[in-house]
Amino acid sequence: KSYLSEGLPLQGKNILITAGPTHEPIDPVRFIGNHASGLMGFELAKAAAKLGGKVILISGPTHLSVDDSAIQLVRVVTADQMFDAALGHYDKIDVAICAAAVADYKPKTVADQKIKKKAEDFTIELIKNKDILMTLGERKKNQYLVGFALETENELENAQAKLKKKHLDAIVLNSLNDAGAGFGKPTNKITFIDKNSTIKAFELKSKAEVALDIWNEIIARTHA
Ligand code: CTP
Ligand code: CA
């Protein structure tokens, strides 16, 4: 069943979305990052706005931009900045989706000058970043909270374990074992899993269409 044609199902709703990679500085000219494009999060934001929602889109470094007055784009660089922005807006949020590919670790110290080449071996000590999604889960009041999971083995089990551990209402499993899906690609293949273990697998399709599928599942579960 599609809920998306029934007027504006997200009218009056405040939506929070994290998107893109994070960049964790090593020194003034270098960082640790990943190849996330931000596209999935941006498509989720655009779809939410089209459905009547007011969106705060918190994005790490990306070439994407938005031109929609219903979307407030907050650009950040590091996981710490994304954490502060997300937590800062969370109280008034109705639905939050964490689609960002947050760096799991950051350099323990950031050199204030460019690191010079010296020894043959060079090690950077890393420390864990705060888990934004897990913190949103711990501080959840009435928000409907959705995470993403990227797994290469035991996909469903691992995704469901993440859903429980982070106190989520639903999790979107990204299937990488498909040549057309995932990082940097315009398409994605997802499985939507909710906290009642209802599992819905979707076909490979454009990220714009995937975003609408995800919103349809969320709206179906939040329309009392
Ligand atoms: N996430 C987050 N903050 C982090 C790490 C992850 O908000 N510091 C969110 C991602 O945005 C995603 C979900 O947590 O919605 C799962 O991310 P994923 O990398 O699949 O899982 P991790 O919990 O980081 O575990 P691992 O990478 O070891 O599988
Ligand atoms: Ca991770």
Image (tube, helix red, strand yellow):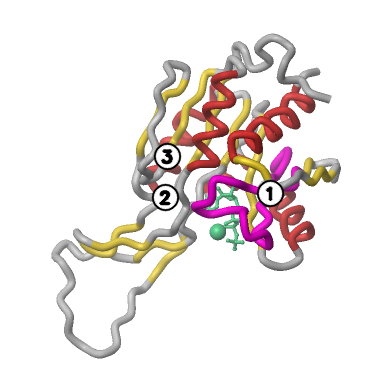
Does the beta carbon at disc 2 come under 8 Å from ligand 1?
yes
Observer-nearest residue: 68 or 199? 68
Pinpoint residue 180: horizontal percent, then vertical percent: 62, 55
- Residue found 78% across the figure and 57% down from its top: 156
| Neighbour tally class for label 1: few under 14, some 14-19, many 20 plus, Cα within 10 Å | many
Residue corresponding to mark 2: 79
Q: Is residue 125 left or right of residue 192?
A: left
- Residue found 62% across the figure and 24% down from its top: 94
- Residue found 41% across the figure and 51% down from its top: 22
Secondary structure beneath disc 1? loop
Q: Which image quarter holds the C terminus?
A: top right
- Mark 1 and mark 2 lie on one chain; the one further toward the N terminus is 2
Residue corresponding to mark 3: 59
Report the magenta residues as a range: 168-192
Let me know if residue 110 appears in the view: no
* Disc number lying in front (1 or 3): 1
Image position of 148 with respect to 96: above or below: below
Three-letter amino acid code at the position of disc 3:
Ser
Residue corresponding to mark 1: 189
- 2 and 3 marks in contact (CB < 8 Å): no
Secondary structure beneath disc 2? helix
Q: Is residue 180 magenta?
A: yes
